[in-house]
Image (cartoon, rainbow, N blue to C red):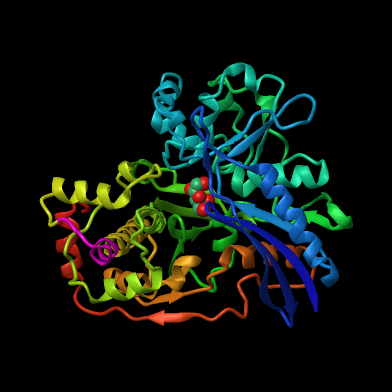
Amino acid sequence: MDSFVAVDLGASSGRVMLGEVTDGRIALSEVRRFATGPRERPEGGLRWDVGEMEAEIRAGLADTACARPVSVGIDSWAVDYGLLGPDGQLSGDVRCYRDPRTDGMAERLRATVDDATLYGMTGLQYLPFNTIYQLLAEPPERLADARMLLLPDLLAYRLTGRIGAEVTNASTTGLLDASTRRWSTELLARTPIPAPLLPPLRGPGERIGVGPGGIPVVAVASHDTASAVAAVPASGSDFGYISCGTWSLVGLELPSPVLDERARMANFTNEAGIDGTVRFLRNTMGLWLLSESLRVWNGRGLDVDLAQVLTAAEAEPAFGSVVDPDDPVFLTPGDMPERIADVCGRTGQPVPRTPPAVVRTILESLALAHARSLDTAARLSGRRIRTVHLVGGGARNELLCQLTADACGLPVHAGPVEASAIGNIGVQARAAGMLQDIRSSSAPIATYFPRGRRSRWDAAARRAGLR
Ligand code: LFR
């Protein structure tokens, strides 16, 4: 039996996990969990506490030392970075992508690169927080003589002293050429971003250096979604996936990017997956709507328990109201129940008043958005989808899985919950020659079959202006 450590950082919590590989299967156990959530600074701006994350990772590694792990790998959400000054020290804080500082940056870029040309180069969906827009929002003097390290690369640097940019995460920056998987010098030349800011690229499975206690640090698919997709327990080409946590990442694994105008207009992205694959997907706001609602309710002393409110939501009448979860009003932290009420009012639908009614609206809206994105992915790629794999924390949410199966009219296989950590460990174990198939874990999978007629979902989508 061989052990590996996965550091898997999510936007609300981070985990240090131990993965044991026996007979070609990965079994996980959690060693340490800590809060990661961004903090609002008195002077303004949402920031991540990288020092605290590093301390937690070091403590987690110390806890795993007796298992004598072969290596450790780090994955996290995408797009956010730290800047290293010429002295090799982190200069300033690491900002959170939900910080509205990028307002106006897309327009600024458009002055030198039009949207279609940009998409043809990078294949990246437009999200206001893509790294390229964050960099354009920096004072130019901060970029001179600096090095940009995406969060997992920054943490790996703090453990090993080695710099680099892992390619799956680099593909979310808006600076990587989707066809060549190199930094796009052509694009950089049209921006004020200095080329030396970007460190050399490296791929999943490459050794980065030596970390605390002598443990080798290995580059994994360091974008959490890339690790999660690598762990989807499917084969063949007729499956769609939903990596469901804070975000729902909905799409297909393809052999090459789709860079045409229809894909751009549908705001689909072509992010880099392992083994040269393309993650052709769309971001949907995801369980963020639910976690923010719980935060707001509990902050007001309503004491809403997740399991109880999900049970109550199941008993709520179907199709009371639905919203477009991708409405930009839901991007920043805040009072989601209030924002949902506003959107329902605006679209002439009944306003959900109680927590169970709000939760029902959120979950039906997410299920609809899942179905819509899978339909679009199939249409744009010419693929047929026969089954859906839903991985990540959302796989625990039985109501969401069932509603997704209903809205898609397809069976949904839910699990593994810990897909990112499994993908992270799988890449390390395969690089060490101890595993052949990353997609095989011992995690349980539950299957949900579609119920009812899809036409009811179509009608609800029209009411919300979704189709
Ligand atoms: C999911 C995720 C998404 C990315 C978003 C922001 O955790 O990594 O793939 O678009 O977070 O980084």
The single residue placed furthest to the front in the displayed view is 301
In the drawing, does residue 240 fall left or right of residue 319? right
Residue 97 placed where, x, y %? 50, 39
The single residue placed furthest to the top in the displayed view is 141
**Residue 357 colored magenta?**
yes
Residue 440 placed where, x, y %? 62, 76
In the drawing, does residue 454 fall left or right of residue 83? left
- Identify the residue at horizontal 77%, vertical 24% (top origin): 86
**Residue 15 colored magenta?**
no
Q: Is residue 208 visible?
A: yes
Magenta residues? 351-360
In the drawing, does residue 362 fall left or right of residue 317? right
Residue 39 placed where, x, y %? 53, 41
Towards the viewer: 391 or 302: 302
Towards the viewer: 463 or 37: 37
- Relative vertical location of residue 58 with respect to residue 124 in this rendering, above or below: below
Magenta stretch: dominant SS?
helix
Q: Quadrant of residue 240?
A: bottom left
In the drawing, does residue 433 fall left or right of residue 29? right
- Identify the residue at horizontal 47%, vertical 60% (top origin): 245
- Relative vertical location of residue 342 with respect to residue 457 in this rendering, above or below: above
The single residue placed furthest to the right in the displayed view is 214
Quadrant containing the C terminus is: bottom left
Residue 268 placed where, x, y %? 40, 48
Q: Is residue 71 visible?
A: no
Q: Quadrant of residue 346?
A: top left
Quadrant containing the N terminus is: bottom right
- Identify the residue at horizontal 54%, vertical 35% (top origin): 131
